[in-house]
Image: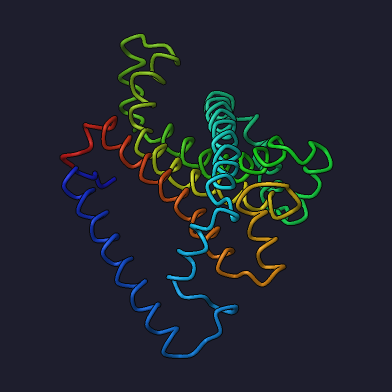
């Protein structure tokens, strides 16, 4: 797996920022030149102005979504790591549970979100549960793939020196799995935000999904786009955080 150095990381972020500014300027000019009504597709300047309006309470709703996404992500991480270790050591359990996990992932989230609202109430529990459902599956797949990464020769050598299964897990499997785990975390972080949004769209009383629903109902598309941009910003922050942590923790991969 290709490592990310500090120079490459900041270079990539800088290029992304410049590209984003250029695209916003082109979009601002293009929408005004095309004469598209602002209630259909507002220019970036209108979206920024809407985000700064006190009555929109963008920071409040962003905080509500962030809390649900982070709580759901934490639960999803615990569930994914626990299942990955169980699947690693007890293969029959994986054979039994994995098809049901796939069935759970195939359920339409639009249908599941209202049920979670009924079961858990309209508070943070339902939103965090949906975020956990979105985040746990890709992280489980990445973690179990990484834990099974070591070659049979490496495992045989550890066993020849008398290492236990837990010692092999701690000293060989886990370090080998870290690049995979962080790749899964980057995906899981973004999906946790999406899961929280889906739950809020189903009928929550706060959060960016709630703001999107109420804004589109009133044709205040500039406010809706501001909420979408805030959600994208949350996902980008989580992605960048896990990218930085990977660079900090998986130091032995930097020179590969």
> Residue farthest to the right?
118
Is 25 placed above or below 206 here? Answer: below
Position of residue 35 measured from the top left corner of the image (x, y, whole percent): 49, 90
In the shown orientation, is residue 136 left or right of residue 20?
right
Residue 92 appears in which quarter of the rendering?
Answer: top right
The structure residue drawn at horizontal position 62% and vertical position 51%, both measured from the top left corner, is: 197
Which quadrant is home to the C terminus?
Answer: top left
Position of residue 120 measured from the top left corner of the image (x, y, whole percent): 79, 36
Is 94 placed above or below 62 here? Answer: above
Residue 33 appears in which quarter of the rendering?
Answer: bottom left
> Residue farthest to the top?
162
In this picture the colour scheme is: rainbow
The structure residue drawn at horizontal position 54% and vertical position 31%, both measured from the top left corner, is: 74
The structure residue drawn at horizontal position 33% and vertical position 74%, both measured from the top left corner, is: 25
Depth check, front residue: 206 or 107: 206
> Residue farthest to the bottom?
34
In the shown orientation, is residue 43 left or right of residue 9?
right
Position of residue 241 measured from the top left corner of the image (x, y, whole percent): 37, 40
> Residue farthest to the front?
54
Depth check, front residue: 175 or 205: 205
């Amino acid at each position: 797996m290709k490592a990310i150095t500090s120079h490459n990381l900041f270079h990539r972020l800088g290029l992304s920022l410049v590209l984003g500014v250029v695209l916003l300027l082109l979009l601002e000019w293009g929408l005004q030149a095309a004469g598209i009504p602002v209630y259909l597709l507002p220019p970036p300047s209108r979206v920024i102005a809407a985000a700064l309006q006190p009555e929109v309470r963008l920071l409040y709703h962003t905080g509500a979504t962030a809390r649900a996404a982070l709580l759901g992500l934490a639960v999803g991480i615990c569930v994914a790591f626990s299942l990955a270790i169980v699947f690693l050591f007890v293969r029959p359990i994986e054979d039994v549970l994995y098809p049901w996990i796939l069935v759970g992932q195939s359920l339409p989230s639009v249908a599941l979100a209202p049920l979670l609202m009924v079961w858990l109430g309209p508070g943070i529990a339902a939103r965090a549960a949906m975020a956990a459902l979105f985040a746990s599956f890709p992280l489980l797949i990445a973690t179990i793939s990484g834990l099974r990464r070591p070659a049979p020769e490496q495992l045989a050598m550890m066993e020849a020196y008398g290492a236990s299964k837990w010692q092999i897990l701690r000293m060989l499997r886990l370090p080998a799995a870290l690049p995979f785990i962080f790749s899964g975390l980057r995906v899981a972080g973004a999906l946790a935000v999406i899961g929280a949004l889906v739950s809020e769209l189903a009928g929550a009383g706060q959060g960016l999904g709630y703001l999107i629903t109420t804004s589109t109902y009133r044709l205040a598309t500039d406010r809706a786009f501001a909420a979408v941009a805030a959600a994208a910003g949350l996902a980008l922050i989580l992605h960048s955080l896990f990218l930085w942590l990977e660079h900090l923790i998986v130091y032995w991969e930097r020179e590969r």
